[in-house]
Image (spheres, rainbow, N blue to C red):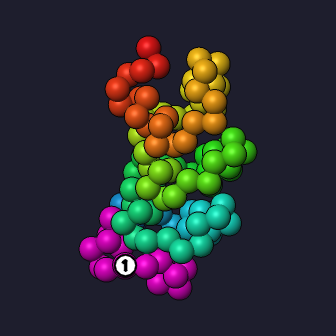
Amino acid sequence: MKDAGIRGMTSEKLMGLRALGVNAAYVKGMSAAGYPELEADKLTGMKAVGVSPEKVAQVHALGFKPSQEELIQMSVFKIDAPFIERMKAKGFTNPTISQLVKIKIFKLDE
């Protein structure tokens, strides 16, 4: 993991990454998806909620360039292509990730 350039690495964080199955392939995939400077904490968070390089590609295809934290939020609140399309159909044109998260938190999509 150290050779992969992960920042903020400690032995404790390494154990957390290993427990979640974060391996060199995952790190390389996330780097190739546009996140070359990964932090151990964010990597742990992303893997824990199911962020994958494939999901990142889907988000990018929708026109978003989220931060690592925004990727985590999108996964936690299940902000995906069908949800975004529903919100656009309801009149939310060009919503930001922050707006989409707030829509989910306050259940404005119901």
The total number of labels drawn is 1
Q: In this view of the protein, can residue 61 be seen by the observer?
A: yes
Question: Which residue is pictured at 49% across the width and 35% down the height?
Answer: 100
Q: Quadrant of residue 53?
A: bottom right
Q: Main secondary structure of the magenta part?
A: loop
- Residues shaded magenta: 1-16
Give neighbour class at mark 1: few <14, some 14-19, many 20+ (Cα, 10 Å).
few
Q: Which residue appears at 38% of the width and 22% of the height? A: 107
Q: What residue sits right under mark 1 in the picture?
A: 8
In the image, is 16 to the left or to the right of 96? left
Q: Quadrant of the C terminus?
A: top left
Q: Is residue 11 magenta?
A: yes
Name the residue located 63 percent from the left edge and 25 percent from the top edge.
88
Q: Which image quadrant is residue 35 in?
A: bottom right
88 vs 56: above or below: above
Give the structural element (helix, strand or loop) at label 1.
loop
Toward the left, the furthest residue is 12
Q: Amino acid at mark 1?
A: Gly
Q: Position of residue 109 (x, y in %)?
A: 46, 19
Tell whether position 108 is magenta: no
